[in-house]
């Protein structure tokens, strides 16, 4: 019994020492910092870079474990939305949960399997179209440097044989 108590005491002491040495593990995790290129305040445009569709403020939350989006469209009336971006501990992949105002069949929307590769954060998703048909999708944030990010979303109704662009936005840092 003394050995069990001593072993448990040593394990707990090690855990508390680690927790004190690194109380905010997400802040120093390279994987958790992969989406930091999107942090900031942005004006959002169509690809012509003249037609503004919205504004977005992206910030770090939960001591570095969350990227939080705050969206407001330029539509009349304006719509708003928020996304929470985080790493799923079971898959070690990024996920995004989007909830927006306005009429949207796929609200909330979940994007999964996020990975940062080739200067872009890439997500997959499924959704239902207006006719009730299942679609697969790709949702990509391109890190364009020079204070620009491209957000591109496309869907396929035929298992990826053909793709239709849902939206293509360019974020320009304020």
Image: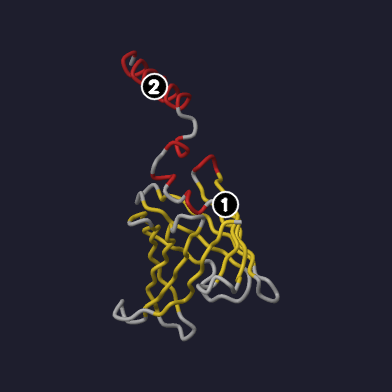
Which residue does the image show at 33% across and 55% down from the upper left?
117
Q: Which residue is mark 1?
A: 40
Q: Residues within 10 Å of mark 2 (few under 14, many from 20)?
A: few
Q: Is residue 51 above or below residue 120?
A: below
113 vs 35, nearest the viewer: 35
- Between 95 and 56, the residue placed more toward the observer is 56
* Residue 115 position in % (x across, y down): 36, 55
Q: Secondary structure at mark 1?
A: strand
Could you tell whether 53 is left or right of 67 in the image? right
**Residue found 39% across the figure and 69% down from its top:** 138
Residue drawn where x is 53% and y is 51% of the image: 39
Residue 106 location (% of width, % of height): 51, 72
The quadrant of the rendering that contains the N terminus is: top left
**Picture quadrant of residue 95:** bottom left
Q: Residue furthest bottom?
A: 131
* CA distance for labels 2 and 1: 38 Å
Q: Where does label 2 land, which residue?
A: 14
Tag 2 secondary structure: helix
Is 21 situated above or below 126?
above
Residue lying farthest to the right in this orientation = 77
> In the image, residue 56 lies at what x, y percent?
60, 60
């Amino acid at each position: 019994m003394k050995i069990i108590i001593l072993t448990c005491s040593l394990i707990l002491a090690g855990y508390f020492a680690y927790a004190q040495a690194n109380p905010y593990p997400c802040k120093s995790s390279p994987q958790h910092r992969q989406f930091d290129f999107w942090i900031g305040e942005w004006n959002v445009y169509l690809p012509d870079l003249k037609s503004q569709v919205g504004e977005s403020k992206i910030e770090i939350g939960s001591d570095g474990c969350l990227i939080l989006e705050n969206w407001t469209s330029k539509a009349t009336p304006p719509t708003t939305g928020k996304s929470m971006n985080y790493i799923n501990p079971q898959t070690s992949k990024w996920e995004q949960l989007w909830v927006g105002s306005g009429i949207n069949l796929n609200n909330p929307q979940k994007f999964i399997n996020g990975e940062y590769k080739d200067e872009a954060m890439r997500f997959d998703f499924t959704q239902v179209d207006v006719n009730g048909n299942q679609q697969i999708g790709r949702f990509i944030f391109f890190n364009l440097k020079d204070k620009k990010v491209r957000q591109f979303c496309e869907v396929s109704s035929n298992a990826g044989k053909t793709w239709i662009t849902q939206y293509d936005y360019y974020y320009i840092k304020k």
